[in-house]
Each structure stands twice: as C-alpha cells, then as structure tokens.
Amino acid sequence: MVRPPAAPVENVVAVAVAVAAKPMSKPPPRDLSLEGWTEALHDKWAANLTFQELRKGAQAVSDVYVHGRAKGGLAKRAVDGRAKRAAFACYYGVIHAIVVSELFGPRGPLRIPAGVRCLDFGCGPGALGAGLAAGGAEPSSVHGLDLVGANVEMARWTYDWWGLTGGARVGRLPRALGTPRTTDLIGFGWCVNELIPADRKALWGPLQAAVVAGSGILLIEPLSRRAVSWWSEAERALCHDGAKSIEFRVRVDLPTRVRDLDRATGLNHSEVGARVLFKPPGGSGTSR
C-alpha cells in the first residue's frame, strides 16, 4: 500500500498549537437560585427514584414528625431509607431554605452583618446555609453539625453547591456546642424540637452565656405549639440583649418540583412560616 507523504514537522506543531489555543467550551453558568438548587438536589439524591417513590418518602418523613414523635430518634428515622432521605432534602430541605431566604431576603425582617461565621447545628441537608445564601446574606463560612452521617454528607454537598466555605461533621448536642465566638451566629434550624428534654434543657445555660457575651442566635422551629411546647423556656433563657421571638408567615412561589410534591401529598406550602428567636452577633434582634 502506498502511504501518503508525512506532513512536515512544522505543520504538525502548528496544528497542535492551534488546537491547544482553541478556547475550551465552558459549562453553562449555575443557576444560583432555590429553583436551581432544587433541580440539583433532585439530580443528586433522587435521580434513581420514581415520582411515586419520592412522594411516599415525603409522606413517610411527615409521618415520623407528626405521628411518630413519641418514639424518639427523629433525626435518624427521618432519613432511614433512600426515598425518605431524598424527600428530606428535595422537599422539606427546600421548604426550610425558602423560609430562611424569606427571613433574610429583601422583604424579610432579619439581617446579619456580612462576613459572620454561621454555626449550623442540626444542619440536616444544609437548608440554613442555602437559605442564607439565597436570601442574600453573606456569611464568611457555614459550619454544620448533625447527628446523622447521611445529613452531614448532604450538607457538605449543599454548602459546596452554593459556594459556601466551611464544612460539616457528625456530632451530638449539647456536647458539641463548644464555645462559640462572640462574632458567630449560632444557628439551629428545626432541630431543637428533636432533642430529648434533658438535652434541650442542657442547651439553655451555655446558649444564654453566649448570647449575653455577644454571639448571635438563630433558633427556627415549626409554628405548631405541639412540636415546641418548650418554646417559652427558650424565650426565658435567650431573649436577652436584644434577642427577640417572632412568628413569621409569608406567601411564596414554590419551585416546580416542590409544588408537584405538594399536590401529590395533599399538603399546601403556598404559605410558609416558622417560630423564630433571633439576635445578630453584637446587635439587636430585628432590623425593621
């Protein structure tokens, strides 16, 4: 067989240089919104589940908190299976992040100084950090802690997705509280209600000392008094130096996937809300 003549070396080099110089195609910009995060959550944690499986997971998580509270172990039971774990992140996690984003967003009542370190105790899938980022707050870093390893994995992923520095680790309250800095925001998003009474009462003393010393506090829980019959204890312990307790409700436009699950489960989150106890680091409780 007759081979074609070899290309001159200088031509080969020129082609290689031209290929190397050709700009690489960039990935599309990430949609840094709650809708974009919801889609990313679904792709990461629910891609191998059918819609019916995810719906059943959402209903099972709800059953843990509404009907199975007396059994204890809520944090672990809420994510003990693929469908429940996915629903906990893609449905309830997003709803919680929406509440936080509305609290700290342009029409919300709360503000924190830019650059504070946020301690996200009971971090779950990272909803507190996601909500702060979506609402326009600018923490310097978010450091999550959760009893359940699966939640820690999800929170790390969430913080990374939003571009938040920090991390997450496994730990148990109240032992893992440590000694917060006076410039920290100490956050508890929908998790103090999961503690046994003895552990919850053991939190109030150290938290009170931290708030009096200047640390910020953000305690978010359901509006239902049944889930937080102890709320008055928190108010007595923590409403010092400008910390205030509020009930917050707001109508919202839900991400498409959350709206679809709402319809399928018979729930309605077109209005969301929470019971909130708040003081920013070194400041007073509400800005408006």
Image: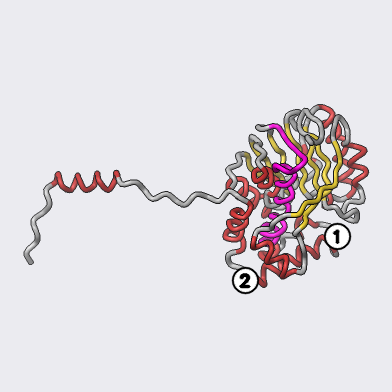
- Where residue 69 is drawn, which disc sits there? 1
Q: Which residue is mark 2?
A: 50
Is 57 or 253 nearer to us in this picture?
A: 253
Position in image of residue 118 (x %, y %): 70, 38
User: Tag 2: Cα neighbours inside 10 Å, few (<14), some, or many (≥20)?
Assistant: few
- What residue type is disc 1 on? Arg
In the rendered view, does 266 fall on the left or right side of 162?
Answer: right
Q: Is residue 41 above or below residue 1?
A: above
The span from disc 1 to disc 2 (Cα, nearest Å) is 27 Å
- Residue 249 screen position, x and y as percent: 81, 51
The main secondary structure of the magenta stretch is helix
**Residue 4 figure quarter:** bottom left
Mark 1 and mark 2 lie on one chain; the one further toward the N terminus is 2
Disc 1 is placed on an element classified as helix
Q: Residue at x 75, y 43 (%)?
A: 108
Q: Residue 270's spot in the image, x, y percent? A: 75, 59
Residue drawn at 76 percent across, 38 percent down: 186
Instruction: State which region is magenta.
Output: 85-113
Image quadrant occupied by the N terminus: bottom left
* Residue 223 part of the magenta segment: no
Instruction: Check the picture and name the quadrant holding the C terminus.
Output: top right
Along the line of sight, the residue nearer the viewer: 132 or 181: 132
**Residue at 58% across, 67% down:** 48
**Foreground pick, 196 / 84:** 84
At mark 2, the secondary structure is loop
- Which-is-in-front pick, marks 1 and 2? 2
Quick check: 43 above or below 160?
below
Q: Amino acid at mark 2?
A: Thr
Query: Which of the numbered marks, if any, corresponds to residue 235?
Result: none
